[in-house]
Image (cartoon, coloured by chain):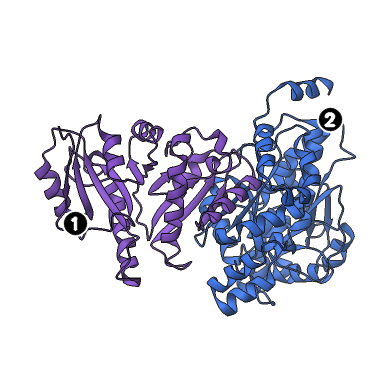
C-alpha cells in the first residue's frame, strides 16, 4: 500500500498537469462553484482510463438529469426556441434524473477502487452521450460541476445517432430515455435500457452500488419466456425441468453483470468481500425449487457470481425491490418496470425478446 | 521579376476580396495526377459551393462567401490543363495562382488567404508556422449533407501550449468569420456544420472552449470531449472535411 502511494507521488501525472491549466482557465466566478471537486483530482489515481480497460457507462442527458420542462419547450415550440431557452437558463443546473443515483454510486465505487489500486484503469467511466445540440453543452457542463459529478467525457452529436459513438467508446451499458435508441444499441450488441422518471424515489445507499437484474430476457435469453407465453406455465415448468442441465443462452445484460463481477473480485482480492461496495441481485419470477435451478446452474457455468438470488415464484417484484433498494433494476417487461417505479425503485426497461410484443408501455414514453 | 502569376477564373463570379472567406488549396490536394480525377478537396468542393449557394439564396447581395484560390506549385503542371480540369469538374475556383513551392507562403499572404487546406501534414505545419492558418483535408468516402469543419479545442483552451502560436491570431479571426457564416443558417438543415473536439483535459476545459468560441461569435453544432481517449474511433465517425487546430493533428491518428 505504501509503495503504491510513493509511486503515485513520483510519477508525472499527465492528468494533473492538464488540471493545473484548467484551473488557470477558470474565471473566479466559476471557481467557487467547484472548489469541493478539485480536491478529488489532486489525490492521485487514474482519472481518464482507456475505454478498453474501463467499464464504460454511457448516459443520455435526459436520464442523468430532469429535462421535462425543456422537452416541452422543444415539443411545443421547436428546436430554435428550445436552444434559446437552454442558453437563457445556462446557469441554472438541471435537477437529478433517474440515472443520477446510479451514477453517483458508480463514482463511490471508483473512489474505493482508486484507494486500493491507484494505477489501475479498471474503473467505471461515465460518458454523457446525447444527441443534444452543443448549444446545450455549457448548461450540461455547469450542471455536472454543480452536482460534483465526475463526467469528463461526452458526445453531443447535434442530432445524429449516438450509436456509433457508443461503439467507439466501447460502451458496456447505455442508459437513455429513448426506447428506439436503446433498441438500436441492443441490436448492436450493447447492453442498454430505457429509463423513466418517477416521482417517488426511495432512498438508496450512498456507500454501496446495488444492481438488480431480472433473469429471463435480461441476463438470460428469452427462450424460456417464449415457451411460457406460447404454452403456459405448466409447459414452462416441464421444459425447465427437462432442460435443467442445459445452459440458458445469454441475454443482453449478461456482459454488464460480468463487468461488475470483475470489479467485485478486485475488492475480494484485497480482503474486502464483506465490505464490497458492489452488490448484485437476481430478482426473478422463477421459483427456487424448480425453474430457478436452471438459472443458477447457468450463472455458475458462466463463472458469474450473483450476491443474492430472489426467486419470487410469480409474486410481485415491487415489495422485494423496495427491500433491496437497488440503484437500478433491469427488467424486460414494462409491467414490472412500472410496478417497481410505483414503489420507488428506479427500474430500467430492456426492450428485448418476446415480451415486447405483449407489453407496451402504459405511460407515454421515452424519447431522446 | 514576377514569380507568381494570378489568373482570375472568368467562369466564376468574383467575390468581394475584403469580405470573402478566402480558402486556398494546392492542385495536389484536388486532382489526382495519376487517375486524372478529383479527390481530396475535390470532395469538399461541392459542399463548399452549396454553402455559397445557400448564402446567396438567403441574400443575393451576400459578400461573406467562400472564395477558393487554387495554387499550382509544380512547374510541370500545365496551367491550361489545370484551368480546363477545373472547368470540367465545375469547381468554383475564384483564382488560379501559378507559383512554386518556395513561394507558397508568400502566395498565400499576397492573396489574403485565411485558411490553407492540405492533404500533406508537413506542408500544413510549415505554412502555419509562418502565420497562415492551415487545416488538413479529410478523406471523405461517405456522402454528407453539410460541409463539416472540425476544430480542435485544446489549443483554444490553453493558448500557451499552442504548438503553432504564429497562426493563433489567424485562427481567432477565422473562427469569428466562420461563426458569422454559420450564423446565417438555422440550427437544422445548415449546409455548414461546426464540430468541436477536445482531446485532453476534461469536460471543464471543453466548456471553456465552447465559451471562448462563443465569445468570438462561433456557435458549435457538435461537441466531443475525449479526455485522453484514443481519437481514431471518434474521428472516423465524425468525418470532418476540414480539420483545424492543435498543431495540425493527423486525421488518421
> Is A360 or A344 nearer to us in this picture?
A344
Q: Is residue A19 left or right of residue B214?
A: right
Q: Is residue B167 left or right of residue B203?
A: left
Mark number, residue A270: 2
> Is A7 or A239 nearer to us in this picture?
A7
Q: Chain of mark 1?
A: B
Residue at figure coordinates x 41%, y 60% from the top left: B181
Do residues under tags 2 and 1 come within 8 Å of each other at their CB atoms? no
- The residue mark sitting in front, 2 or 1, is 1
Q: Position of residue B114 (x, y in %)?
A: 36, 47
Q: Residues within 10 Å of mark 1 (few under 14, many from 20)?
A: few
Q: In the rendered image, what is the letter of the chain coloured blue?
A: A
Q: In the rendered image, what is the letter of the chain coloured purple?
A: B
Q: Quadrant of the C terminus of chain A?
A: bottom right
Q: Position of residue A309 (x, y in %)?
A: 82, 52
Asked if one can make out residue B65 in the rendered structure from this viewpoint, the answer is: yes
> Is B81 or A328 nearer to us in this picture?
B81
> Is A122 or A192 nearer to us in this picture?
A122
Q: Chain of mark 2?
A: A
Q: Position of residue B185 (x, y in %)?
A: 43, 67
Quickly name the residue at label 1. B90
Helix or strand or loop: what does disc 2 sit on?
loop
**Which residue, as the protein is rendered here, is positioned at the far bottom?**
A76
Q: Is residue A195 left or right of residue B27?
A: right
Residue at figure coordinates x 62%, y 75% from the top left: A73
- Report how far apart the C-alphas of labels 2 and 1 lie in the structure: 69 Å
Residue at figure coordinates x 32%, y 40% from the top left: B118
Q: Residue B143 appears in which quarter of the rendering?
A: bottom left
Amino acid at each position: 500500500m505504501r509503495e503504491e502511494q510513493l509511486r503515485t507521488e513520483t510519477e508525472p501525472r499527465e492528468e494533473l498537469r492538464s488540471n493545473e491549466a484548467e484551473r488557470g482557465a477558470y474565471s473566479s466566478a466559476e471557481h467557487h462553484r467547484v472548489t469541493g471537486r478539485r480536491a478529488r483530482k489532486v489525490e492521485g489515481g487514474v482519472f481518464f482510463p482507456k475505454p478498453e480497460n474501463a467499464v464504460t457507462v454511457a448516459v443520455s442527458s435526459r436520464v442523468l438529469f430532469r429535462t421535462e420542462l425543456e422537452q416541452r419547450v422543444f415539443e411545443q415550440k421547436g428546436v430554435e426556441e428550445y436552444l434559446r431557452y437552454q442558453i437563457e437558463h445556462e446557469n441554472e443546473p438541471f435537477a437529478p434524473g433517474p440515472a443520477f443515483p446510479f451514477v453517483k454510486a458508480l463514482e463511490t465505487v471508483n473512489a474505493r477502487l482508486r484507494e486500493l489500486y491507484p494505477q489501475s484503469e479498471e474503473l467505471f467511466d461515465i460518458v454523457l452521450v446525447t444527441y443534444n445540440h452543443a448549444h446545450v453543452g455549457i448548461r450540461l457542463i455547469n450542471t455536472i460541476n454543480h452536482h460534483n459529478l465526475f463526467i469528463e467525457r461526452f458526445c453531443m452529436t447535434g442530432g445524429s445517432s449516438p450509436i456509433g459513438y457508443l461503439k467507439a467508446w466501447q460502451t458496456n451499458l447505455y442508459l437513455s430515455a429513448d426506447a428506439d435508441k436503446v433498441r438500436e444499441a441492443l441490436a448492436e450488441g450493447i447492453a442498454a435500457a430505457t429509463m423513466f422518471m418517477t416521482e417517488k424515489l426511495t432512498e438508496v445507499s450512498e456507500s454501496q452500488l446495488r444492481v438488480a437484474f431480472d433473469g429471463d430476457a435480461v441476463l438470460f435469453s428469452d427462450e424460456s419466456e417464449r415457451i411460457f407465453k406460447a404454452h403456459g406455465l405448466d409447459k414452462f415448468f416441464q421444459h425447465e425441468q427437462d432442460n435443467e442441465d442445459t445452459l440458458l443462452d445469454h441475454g443482453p445484460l449478461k456482459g454488464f453483470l460480468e463487468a461488475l463481477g470483475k470489479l467485485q473480485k478486485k475488492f475480494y482480492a484485497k480482503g474486502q468481500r464483506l465490505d464490497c461496495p458492489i452488490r448484485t441481485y437476481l430478482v426473478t419470477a422463477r421459483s427456487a425449487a424448480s425453474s430457478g435451478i436452471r438459472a443458477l446452474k447457468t450463472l455458475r457455468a458462466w463463472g458469474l457470481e450473483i450476491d443474492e438470488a430472489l426467486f419470487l415464484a410469480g409474486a410481485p417484484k415491487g415489495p422485494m425491490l423496495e427491500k433491496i433498494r437497488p440503484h437500478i433494476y433491469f427488467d424486460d417487461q414494462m409491467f414490472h418496470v412500472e410496478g417497481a417505479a410505483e414503489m420507488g425503485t428506479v427500474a430500467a426497461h430492456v426492450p428485448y425478446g418476446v415480451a415486447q410484443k405483449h407489453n407496451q408501455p402504459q405511460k407515454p414514453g421515452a424519447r431522446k | 521579376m514576377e514569380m507568381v502569376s494570378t489568373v482570375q477564373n472568368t467562369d466564376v463570379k468574383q467575390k468581394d476580396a475584403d469580405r470573402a472567406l478566402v480558402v486556398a488549396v494546392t492542385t495536389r490536394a484536388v486532382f489526382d495526377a495519376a487517375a486524372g480525377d478529383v479527390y481530396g478537396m475535390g470532395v469538399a468542393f461541392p459542399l463548399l459551393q452549396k454553402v455559397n449557394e445557400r448564402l446567396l439564396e438567403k441574400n443575393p447581395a451576400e459578400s461573406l462567401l467562400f472564395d477558393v484560390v487554387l495554387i499550382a506549385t509544380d512547374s510541370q503542371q500545365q496551367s491550361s490543363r489545370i484551368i480546363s480540369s477545373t472547368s470540367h469538374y465545375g469547381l468554383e475556383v475564384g483564382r488560379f495562382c501559378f507559383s512554386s513551392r518556395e513561394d507558397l507562403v508568400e502566395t498565400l499572404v499576397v492573396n489574403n488567404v485565411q485558411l490553407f487546406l492540405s492533404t500533406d501534414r508537413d506542408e500544413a505545419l510549415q505554412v502555419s508556422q509562418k502565420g497562415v492558418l492551415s487545416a488538413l483535408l479529410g478523406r471523405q468516402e461517405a456522402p454528407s449533407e453539410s460541409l463539416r469543419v472540425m476544430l480542435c479545442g485544446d489549443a483554444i483552451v490553453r493558448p500557451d501550449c499552442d504548438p503553432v502560436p504564429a497562426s493563433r491570431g489567424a485562427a481567432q479571426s477565422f473562427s469569428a468569420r466562420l461563426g458569422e457564416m454559420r450564423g446565417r443558417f438555422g440550427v437544422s438543415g445548415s449546409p455548414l456544420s461546426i464540430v468541436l473536439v477536445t482531446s485532453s483535459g476534461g469536460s471543464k476545459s471543453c466548456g471553456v472552449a465552447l465559451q471562448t468560441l462563443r465569445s468570438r461569435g462561433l456557435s458549435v453544432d457538435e461537441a466531443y470531449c475525449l479526455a485522453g481517449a484514443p481519437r481514431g474511433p471518434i474521428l472516423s465517425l465524425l468525418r470532418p472535411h476540414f480539420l483545424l487546430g492543435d498543431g495540425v493533428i493527423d486525421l488518421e491518428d
